[in-house]
Image (cartoon, helix red, strand yellow):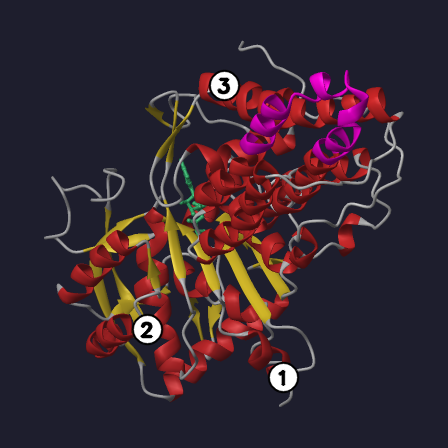
Amino acid sequence: MSKTHNPRYYITTPIYYVNDVPHIGHAYTTIAADVMARYRRLRGDDVFFLTGSDEHGLKIEKAAEGNRERPIDLADRVVTGFMKLWKRLNISTNDFIRTTEERHRITVQHFFEHIKARGDIYLGEYQDWYCIPCESFWTDTQLIEGKCPDCKRVVEKLKEESYFFRMSRYQEQLLDYIEKNPDLIQPSYRKNEVVSFVKSGLRDLSISRTSFKWGIPVPGDERHVIYVWFDALVNYITAAGYPGDMERFNDTWPADLHLVGKDILRFHAIYWPTFLMAAGLPLPKKVFAHGWWTVEGEKMSKSKGNVVDPNEIIDRYGVDQFRYFLLREVPFGLDGDFSTTALVGRINGELANDLGNLLSRSIAMTIKYFDGVIPAPCSSEEIDRELIRTAEEAVSGLDGAMKEVAFQRGLTNIWSVVSFANKYIETNAPWALAKDEAKKERLQTVIYNTLESLRVTAILISPFMPDTAVKMWEALNIPTLFDEVKIGDARWGGLKTGTTLSKPAPLFPRVEEK
Ligand code: MSP
């Protein structure tokens, strides 16, 4: 089949459980995925960006029971909250999948039957410990002091007839695949954890339940519903068109990047690849696990009442400020702490002082010295070339960082332009040049270069702070629509001269810590 479009880039977030309203943990993965999706579009890729909701399973059934409502009503209500938040956060998804949709039921049942027909699903009996909050099984030896080794909560003994997936059969094949594809599981310290887990032995996996109803029925045996993780992981191929639209599927799958939190890496790096192997489908190219946020130094939990609602942060501090903070504060992959002090510090420092002031004073000088008309650059001195080099290096540095899913490094690369542009103004002192008519040409050059560095910065920050990029674009009065901008436009010298600028509103109002 011939491909007529640009390179395809398929990126996913986890699909979120609907027993809980969205918090910063959910926002984190989704914002990170959005930044990557926007960056790839900026590079010209044909991006397919997917998020959604995980709506089946005992956990959701119990939560609905507790509220005396039907699970689907609970799901409908909570999903609306997620969708609204993604809209506010400027999340540019191409699809939103709910596991209760018909298209997903068809895919899951087909996938199940297909693997069964290939001999890797069988009926057996199951007896183990089950942790409902984690939707995970544990053997006696895995329990820690009789409790779930992940969340330390009480587990229940389950004994029932169950369909099993022959995961044990794939242990060596998976280890071999991981070794030959060192990029599959990232960061590498997490890959090592996965490898030692697999080496400790893969057991067959129970993938159906008879003890509750809220799930997708096993085809041909309706007493059973399919285990929620088997159901949930399949969302990534449902949305790509499997099996109804194989042309689109073959064109979209495998995913280039599954972004997940470290707590659910095992499901994505062990279960999912072995399911796909059993089905004879290609494996995702990369699974990247990020770390967890604490809040003001403490683990976030409902019982502590310290769960951060992203809506409140946006109301108080702004969307781009929140997006920036999450990706700037910690290297992607490591754990981090969300604190008001840190957030306010970055907003007032890097955003308001470094970037916001750079824009407002550059435009103010253009107005003061050139009646707002962007002047033409003339001479070129070493410091100008250094500024240009810094901008060029930021473009390639950002690209390298994004290939490694290193958002923080991407941002520090961009900030090297912002910092250098500020230093450039101080060193060249336009206010002094303006006093001497003989230095008029030098003044033109300095103002042009400063404005041009802002144009380049606007392009580079756009995946991270899409609203801010457009505001900067408008402040620089650039006629092209920002939507049409591509990374190639970040080449130095793109700013047209002769356009008139006027005083913009501050990009980032300074904030007080409450
Ligand atoms: N439904 C499963 C995923 C199925 S994917 C096929 C699930 N859902 S979840 O609602 O619990 O959300 C999971 C995501 O939120 C995970 O990526 C998890 O790491 C992330 N976070 C939850 N709390 C978090 C923090 N405190 N910090 C960062 N991310 C956290 O698991």
Q: Which residue is mark 2?
A: 274
**Which residue occupies 87% across, 28% down?**
372
For marks 2 and 3, give the one nearer the viewer: 3
Along the viewing direction, whichever of 221 and 402 lies nearer the viewer: 402
Q: CA distance from mark 2 to mark 1?
A: 23 Å
Q: Answer few, some or many: residues within 10 Å of disc 1's Cα (few below 14, many 20 plus, some between 14 and 19).
A: few
Q: Exactly how many numbered labels are in the figure?
A: 3
Determine which quarter of the picture holds residue 331.
Answer: top left
The three-letter amino acid code for the residue at tag 2 is: Thr
The three-letter amino acid code for the residue at tag 3 is: Gly
The three-letter amino acid code for the residue at tag 1 is: Glu
Q: Which comes before the other along the chain, label 1 or label 3?
A: 1
Where residue 266 appears, as percent x and y from the top left, is: 30, 57
Residue 220 vs 495, above or below: the answer is below
Q: Which residue is mark 3?
A: 345
Along the viewing direction, whichever of 450 and 197 lies nearer the viewer: 450
Q: Which comes before the other along the chain, label 2 or label 1?
A: 1
For marks 2 and 1, give the one nearer the viewer: 1
**Which residue occupies 33% across, 41% down?**
334
Q: Which residue is mark 1?
A: 247
- Mark 2 lies on a secondary structure that is helix
Q: Is residue 181 visible?
A: yes
